[in-house]
Amino acid sequence: MNNLFKTPYDGERGRSQFATEGESLTKQADKDRCDINRIVNGYRRTGLVAHTNTQQPTYGNATGVDFQSAMNLVIEAQESFMALPAAIRKKFGNDPAQFLEFTSDEANLEAMYDLGLAERPEAAPAVAVAVQEGGPSMPPAVEAPASSIGDE
């Protein structure tokens, strides 16, 4: 009977092999420090595990915004970027950070108008001003009526 799916008990085991082509990108300088046999032998001799990180952790101060708010802001920025047309995203290497850097620079405002990322401000309508010969004139002064407060 032929199984519809492969199980570990079928008896057939395919071997997969990998051959590095060209120069290996693996850093060989750390080969001895990463060898488990050397680590265990060092432990047997000294009773210490010496391959651990000995540096103290460093903590930063990020006041003003809590982690959840920062993550929500990042997610919102990514969603806004993904809502843009694919051609515009491609101009920024599909990277929201590059897009944000571009749109934050006021020197790119004209390019943002061309891409449709910003709307050009409407020009203020021209106002006609009538000028009389001899310069502008002041309207005649109007005298205020005398106050009758206190005349009672």
Image (cartoon, grey):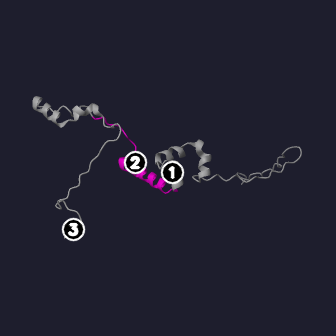
Q: Which residue is mark 2?
A: 70
User: Residue 64, percent across and down?
Assistant: 40, 43
For the residue pair 83 and 142, the one nearer the viewer reads as 83
Looking at this view, name the residue that lies furthest to the bottom. 1
| Label 3 sits on residue | 3
Q: Residue 49 versus residue 26: which sits nearer the camera?
A: 26
For the residue pair 82 and 148, the one nearer the viewer reads as: 82
- Range of magenta residues: 57-85
Question: Spatial distance from mark 2 to mark 1, Cα to Cα?
Answer: 26 Å
Q: Quadrant of residue 60?
A: top left
According to the picture, the residue beneath numbered tag 1 turns out to be 90
Quick one: SS at disc 1? helix
The residue depicted at 21 percent of the width and 68 percent of the height is: 3
Instruction: Kindly identify the residue that appears in the image at 89 percent across and 43 percent down.
Output: 134
Residue 47 among magenta residues: no
Disc 2 marks a residue whose amino acid type is: Ala
Left or right: residue 11 compared with residue 120:
left
